[in-house]
Amino acid sequence: MMKTKQQQPCINKKPEPPLAGAFKERNTGGTSFKKFYERGDFPIALEHDTKGNKIAWKVEIEKLDYHHYLPLFFDGLCETCHPYEFFARQGVHDMLEHGGSKILPVIPQLIIPIKNALNTRCHKVLCTTLKVLQHLVVSAEMVGEALVPYYRQILPVFNIFKNKNLNSGDGIDYSQQKRENVGDLIQETLEAFERYGGEDAFINIKYMVPTYESCMLN
């Protein structure tokens, strides 16, 4: 007599809620910036003064090869440990301050490091990178417009974190005082993109971040 295979009772499982993975921090692994720094390949040293730490550049910043160095310093924006985090962040700001016409041609090389930094989902890295992007768009002529074609790579994380503010209670939000509130920094950065991105900026921002309202039309 053949045994008939018993059917397992059908159990209707409740659909599980989606994992809250969108905000989860992601491991970056080692950066090229860290490797270059540890090999002593950067013309920099740490200098202390009354205002705190700063970079002592061993060459004039204006004479640096921006195609080589600027993408490497942007790569270091993923770093969260001292001294790498400090040198990368301050190095980027120093180079943007002194770069002038050297910055625009390097924009295509900066997109992957920017995207990698944003994709870490790390609060500290996000704040640092958003401040850098605000500096980048005003660092030289046409830089803001040059970023528009890359919004599809840069802005997805903006859309995820745009309405995420750390302050959930009624107390004072000290992150706002220190400019470390991700939601506020994203709003500031999107407004800077719109102001300096030319006539196509707003429609492209709106496509990627549907809740964004123009700061120039209103």
Image (spheres, grey):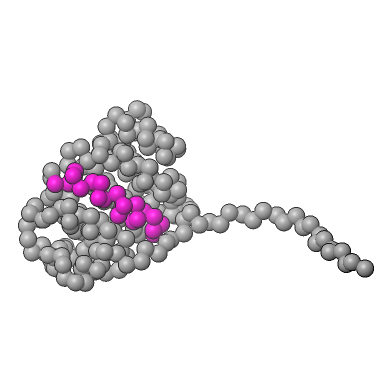
**Residue 151 appearing in the image:** yes
Which of the pair 38/127 is nearer the observer?
38
Image-quadrant location for residue 101: top left
Span of residues in magenta: 102-122
Q: Name the quarter where the C terminus is drawn.
A: top left
Taking depth in this image into account, of 52 and 153 the one nearest to the observer is 153
Say which quadrant the N terminus sits in. Answer: bottom right
For the point 89% across and 66% down, the residue is: 2
The picture places residue 34, in percent across and down from the top left corner, at 25, 67
The residue lying at 24 percent from left, 68 percent from top is 35
Which residue is drawn at the image coordinates 35% and 33% (left, top)?
A: 202
Question: Is 192 located above or below residue 22 in the figure?
Answer: above
124 to the left or right of 110: right
- Looking at the image, residue 172 sits to the left or right of residue 193; the answer is right
Q: Position of residue 30 (x, y in %)?
A: 32, 67
Q: Is residue 183 above or below residue 88?
A: above
Is 118 part of what is drawn in magenta?
Answer: yes
User: Where's residue 108, x and y in %?
Assistant: 25, 46
